[in-house]
Image (tube, rainbow, N blue to C red):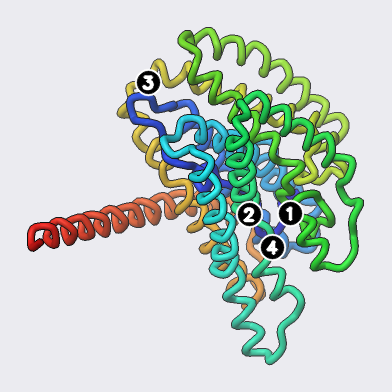
Amino acid sequence: MMNDETKMIAAKPASIEAAPSSDRRYELDLLKVVAIIGMIICHAVYMLGAHHESYATDVAYFVGDYIFGSYLAVAHAFMFAMGVGVVFSKKNKPSDLVKRGIFIYLAGFVLNFFRYGIYALLDGLIEGQFPEETVYAFLVQDIFHFAGLALIFTGALKALKLKEWHILLIGVALSMIGAPLAFSFNGHPALNYILGHFVVTTEDDSTFAFLHWYVFVGFGLFFGRLLQETEDKDRLYRILLFVSAPIMILYIVLSCVFGAMFLTKNGWYYAVSLPEAIGLLSIDMTLLSAFYFLTKKLPKEKLSVPVEMSKNLTPIYCAQWCVIGFADSVFCYLLGFVIPYWAEYLFGVALIFLCYWIAKGWRFLQRKRRERKAKKAALQDGVE
């Protein structure tokens, strides 16, 4: 299911700036927090658990990979949230989206370097030869790459003055085109990788392929506009819950009967089809609706940690991959440790707290840097 390096994203990588705090969507914050928690536990088990001999048939591995990493609100929820974020952003002009998309796409390669690339490079230098995996470690697709392409495409569509429901229809059409094409192309690895940005080629060379995944962003844009223009949000979320909950229950039951990701070709999470996307979105929408009514009953001060995590998705996402990449490369590959599943789950839980504090520290340093820059500018203006 989850490819080695990737699964998720982060809405904040693609998070454009948040809406003003007075209009903050706390239910969306909680959805993203559930996604980031599930993603971290999934990545810890998926990467470290792969060193077990029978991992493909282990129940503990299945739970980490499929439950925490696929069915729980994770990558699909992040991409939905990204679409909503575009609507509520103060910087959503076509040029803003294209620039941010290019930045995020390139940031995916930077993350690849610090996640596994640096260890593959050091190993090659020490051994005197670089295996094929070295190139893979540097170029493997990440959700950042998809998010970047999605923002660039969204900016282009907005430049054409298309409305959100138009974009949703385009996302549906792309999904219907992409699903039957999955695994239809398998040539040179370089071609597989390049084409794999747009349609799933092989499990090694393609993950968040554009044709398969843009429907989540398109639905997020559509829902974000609907949410923005609806005054009676209680009624909106009641209807959403009434529609999404039965679909979710049916989808989960059928998944238990026919197998995980039974609506995708080869059961491959990244080759998501339109029916599978509807099933996954039904989970996201059910949780989102439940969170909306929950946040109405909770004092806002009790939501400070989820809000903080939601604001810090990008540094949390990057931090967890850097820590997992270090642990996997040093302890599993170099030292040959096979970590018990229970320890992998504990490691994932601990990593949630660690990355939360790393992200808080990162934001603190950023804030201090901005303050110094502003102070320096003010002093220069005073001299002039």
Which of the 4 image quarters holds residue 121? bottom right
Residue 227: x %, y % from top left: 52, 19
The residues tagged by marks 3 and 4 sit, at their Cα atoms, a distance apart of: 42 Å
Nearest to N terminus: mark 3 or mark 1: 1
Residue at 36% x, 56% y: name it: 362
Residue shown at the point (52%, 37%) measured from the top left = 32
Can you tell which of label 3 and label 1 is closer to the viewer? 1
Would you name the residue on which mark 4 appears? 140
Residue depth check, mark 3 versus mark 4: number of the one nearer the observer: 4
For the residue labelled by badge 2, is the local secondary structure a helix, a strand or a loop? helix
Q: To which residue does mark 3 refer?
A: 298
Residue 226 lies left or right of residue 193; in this view the side is left
Residue at numbered disc 2: 145
- Amino acid carrying label 3: it is Leu
Helix, strand or loop status at disc 3? loop
Mark 1 and mark 2 in contact (Cβ < 8 Å)? yes
Pair 3/2: label in front:
2
